[in-house]
Image: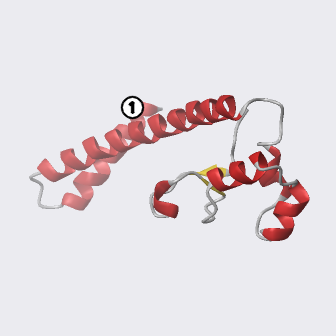
Amino acid sequence: MRFDRITIDPTVATGKPCIRHLRFPVSRLLGLLAAGETRESILKAYRYLESADIDGFRNERPVSERWRTLARGKIVELDALAGRIAIMRGLLQRIQRCQCLDVHRCGWRILNAHNNLRS
């Protein structure tokens, strides 16, 4: 199960998992559901939330299992981003070491060579 509506952004709510980049932490939603709040009461109190924001949490699986599932998915996303960051770091380091008078052209050559290797 994927939780596409859960986002983690260091600039939003100090990096806590939130609903759709809103400053509404997932922990708050889980707390409301655990306290017995209904979908309707939550949507009425927090008008910026959508029904689909709650759907992923309203099932029979224990909260701990849902958190583990979410964590696995987010780790995969972070690993993919880390891989892209490592590639970009390497490309920028190659460009930084370039001794050409026209760094712009050299940078494009390095990027194009990298893109051709990926194809």
Closer to the camera, 76 or 70?
A: 70
Residue 2 x %, y %: 70, 37
- Residue 6: x and y, percent? 64, 49
In the rendered view of the protein, which quadrant contains the N terminus? top right
Mark 1 residue element: helix
- Position of 119 with respect to 30 (left or right) is left
Residue at the outermost left position: 99
Query: Which residue reaches farthest right?
Result: 40
Amino acid carrying label 1: it is Leu
Image-based side of 46 in relation to 77, left or right:
right
> In the figure, 26 relative to 79: above or below?
below
Q: Is residue 54 above or below residue 61?
A: below
Q: Nearer the viewer, residue 89 or 72?
A: 72
Q: Residue at x 73, y 30 (%)?
A: 62
Mark 1 nearby-residue class (10 Å; few <14, some 14–19, many ≥20): few
Asked if residue 15 lies left or right of residue 114, the reply is: right
Identify the residue at image location x=64%, y=52%. Answer: 26
Between 30 and 12, which is closer to the camera in this rendering? Answer: 30
* Nearer to the camera, 95 or 81: 81
Which residue matches tag 1? 117
- Image x and y of residue 31, in percent: 69, 51
| In the depicted structure, whether residue 44 falls above or below residue 3 | below
Residue occupying the point 56% across, 35% down:
71
